[in-house]
Image (tube, grey):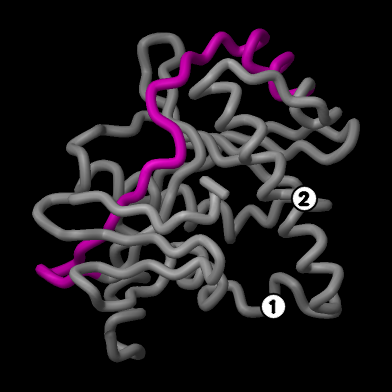
Amino acid sequence: MKDQEVKKEIIQGYEVEFEPILHQYFVNGKQVPSISQICKMENPDIYNGIDQATLNRAAAKGVSLHEEIENYELHGEMGYTTEFHHYLKIKKQYGFKKELTERMVIIEIDGQVVCAGRFDLLATMNGKTLLIDFKRTSQIHQTYVTLQLNLYRLGLMQSYGIPIDQLMVIRLRYDAVEILDLPIQELETKHKLRKYLKTMSI
């Protein structure tokens, strides 16, 4: 299947690979953590009390929703889930326009590649550049997603030179819809990356 193929890009002179089955990133052949892994390290109790089978089922549904949105934005293919149709209503209501979707980014600190990831959607809205992340979770874990979106923002600026004006998370779960603007925290994000480098050998 196309979605299970290894994805490769050259970003700022680095060869970046994403292995989707195991969700692993490699930069010049060396494995680096994903942005999600770093967010989980900073929020270790986020899924406490939830068994792995439940987490796996939720992850599969989340991936399916992301694919529906990506296929619509790239190819105009209509999805069929309730969540997808809520996405169309939100897009019409806010009037944002897709610029990029599901592209890989890398993040460097002090000349060292720290991590890599794939953001959900880069859009423009009211003359501003908007970075959107989609969640299908039962609730928005604000501390987690604030770090996640700020890491993607840093990665987009470093990888492609794209400035990001606004961060937004959209939660879609059955008929539940939640939209949250998140603060830009560039200095705090870099501090957490440096803290990670001190505690992990990569």
The three-letter amino acid code for the residue at tag 2 is: Lys
Looking at the image, residue 143 lies above or below residue 81: below
Reply yes or no: does residue 111 show up in magenta: yes
Q: Which residue occupies 44% across, 64% down? A: 19
Q: How many marks?
A: 2
Name the element at disc 1. Answer: loop
* Image spot of residue 48 (x, y percent): 78, 78
- 47 or 191, which is in the foreground? 47
* Image spot of residue 52 (x, y percent): 80, 77
Reply yes or no: does residue 4 show up in magenta: no
Q: Which residue occupies 73% across, 25% down? A: 79
Residue reaching furthest right?
Answer: 175
Left or right of 146, for residue 110: left
* Image spot of residue 143 (x, y percent): 59, 59
Residue reaching furthest front?
Answer: 1
Residues rendered magenta in the picture:
86-113
Mark 1 closeness class: few <14, some 14–19, many ≥20 residues within 10 Å = few
Q: Which residue occupies 48% across, 33% down? A: 121
CA distance separating discs 1 and 2: 22 Å
Name the element at disc 2. Answer: helix
The three-letter amino acid code for the residue at tag 1 is: Asp
- 169 or 33, which is in the foreground? 33
Residue holding disc 1: 45
* Image spot of residue 27 (x, y percent): 24, 68
Point out the tag, 1 or 2, that comes first from the N-terminus: 1
- 139 or 82, which is in the foreground? 82
Mark 2 closeness class: few <14, some 14–19, many ≥20 residues within 10 Å = some
Residue holding disc 2: 61
